Image (cartoon, rainbow, N blue to C red):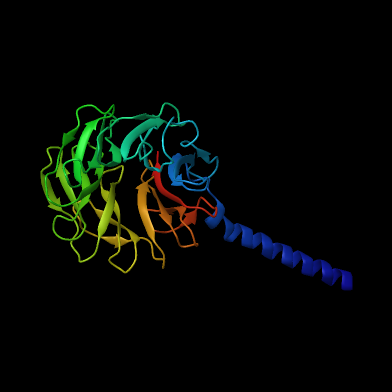
């Protein structure tokens, strides 16, 4: 009889374990529903470099800082952005002294500088057809939005204000650019056309709303804001309506980007002690970490 009780106890324990695995682990660990390539920055090997990985978090590969330049200083390679076809990555780097915009292949090959001036060129993003880039530069004395061909030619200034205009993102139809600016005092989100005419301001509050990103279907904009005390991820309609907070943690959640199909959002967070990359559904549910190490992993871009 004792043996029967032992077997029954063991069977009950086994069933409890199986139930836990089925009910709880898939929500945290199952990544089969995540596809595509994510680029990000990490200082896991010393200084800030660009890496790529599968969107599930597997196959993490360092792309910069290996044989990318000769006679250059120890540098930061930052703010990667994957081209629409996934074949190239833009980023900014201070490897030769000041921040300039560079392009490389998706495997880290053929790294080349496409801007060259004595000031900073930052935050480059691709047009939907991959033929142009929008970026921020302070070459005229303050940070303004510029566009150029993706080979660096035809650099054209779009904005002209005494404030800081930063971090442009193209609409999917290629006709508008969303950005953040402090032209009205604090950082808010604005939309402009390709001639640089500000069409309208989308956010209005006493705090900072920054780093907007247009959804692939053109219906939503994701951004970060510290309006509730610390940096969190928010989403809104492209006319600024229905602003909704997606994350809620005591640490920073920031620098969000969209999955290629627009069903998920990647971002970085410090909620577990150091900066890691996380993914969530567009309603803020099912948040899960896809990188895990003791260094910083941040600023995802997803194709």
Q: Position of residue 168 (x, y in %)?
A: 24, 44
Q: Position of residue 123 (x, y in %)?
A: 30, 43
- Quadrant for the N terminus, please: bottom right
Q: Position of residue 238 (x, y in %)?
A: 22, 50
Q: Which residue sits at x=40%, y=30%?
A: 104
Q: Position of residue 26 (x, y in %)?
A: 56, 55
Which corner quadrant of the image does residue 217 belong to?
top left
The reply to whether residue 171 is in sight is: no
Q: Is residue 21 above or below residue 173?
A: below
* Total numbered circles: 0
Q: Is residue 178 above or below residue 90?
A: below
Judge by depth and name the residue closer to the eye, 32 or 250.
250
24 horizontally vs 189: left or right: right
Q: Which residue sits at x=73%, y=67%?
A: 12
The reply to whether residue 126 is in sight is: yes
Which corner quadrant of the image does residue 141 belong to?
top left
Q: Which residue sits at x=64%, y=61%?
A: 19
Which corner quadrant of the image does residue 169 belong to?
top left
Judge by depth and name the residue closer to the eye, 276 or 5.
276
Q: Is residue 213 above or below residue 124?
A: below
- Quadrant for the C terminus, please: top left
């Amino acid at each position: 009889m004792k043996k029967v009780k032992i077997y029954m106890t063991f069977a009950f324990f086994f069933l409890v374990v199986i139930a836990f695995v089925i009910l709880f682990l898939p929500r945290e660990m199952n990544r089969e529903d995540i596809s595509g390539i994510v680029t990000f920055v990490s200082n896991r090997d010393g200084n800030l470099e660009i890496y790529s990985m599968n969107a599930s978090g597997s196959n993490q590969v360092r792309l910069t800082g290996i044989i990318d330049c000769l006679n250059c200083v120890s540098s930061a390679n930052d703010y990667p952005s994957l081209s629409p076809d996934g074949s190239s990555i833009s980023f900014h780097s201070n490897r030769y002294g000041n921040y300039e915009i560079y392009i490389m292949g998706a495997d880290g090959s053929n790294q080349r500088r496409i801007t060259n001036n004595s000031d900073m060129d930052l935050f480059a993003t691709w047009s939907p057809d991959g033929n142009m880039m929008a970026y921020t530069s302070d070459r005229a004395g303050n940070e303004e939005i510029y566009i150029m061909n993706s080979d660096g030619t035809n650099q054209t200034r779009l904005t002209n204000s005494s404030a800081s205009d930063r971090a442009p993102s193209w609409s999917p139809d290629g006709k508008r650019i969303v950005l953040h600016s402090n032209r009205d005092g604090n950082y808010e989100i604005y939309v402009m056309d390709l001639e640089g005419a500000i069409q309208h301001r989308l956010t209005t509050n006493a705090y900072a709303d920054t780093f907007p990103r247009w959804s692939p279907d053109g219906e939503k904009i994701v951004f970060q804001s510290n309006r509730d005390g610390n940096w969190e991820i928010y989403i809104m309609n492209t006319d600024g309506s229905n602003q909704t907070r997606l994350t809620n943690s005591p640490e920073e959640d920031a620098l969000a980007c969209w999955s290629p199909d627009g069903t998920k959002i990647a971002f970085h967070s410090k909620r577990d002690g150091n900066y890691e990359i996380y993914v969530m559904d567009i309603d803020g549910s099912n948040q899960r970490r896809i990188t895990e190490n003791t260094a910083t992993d941040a600023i995802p871009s997803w194709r």
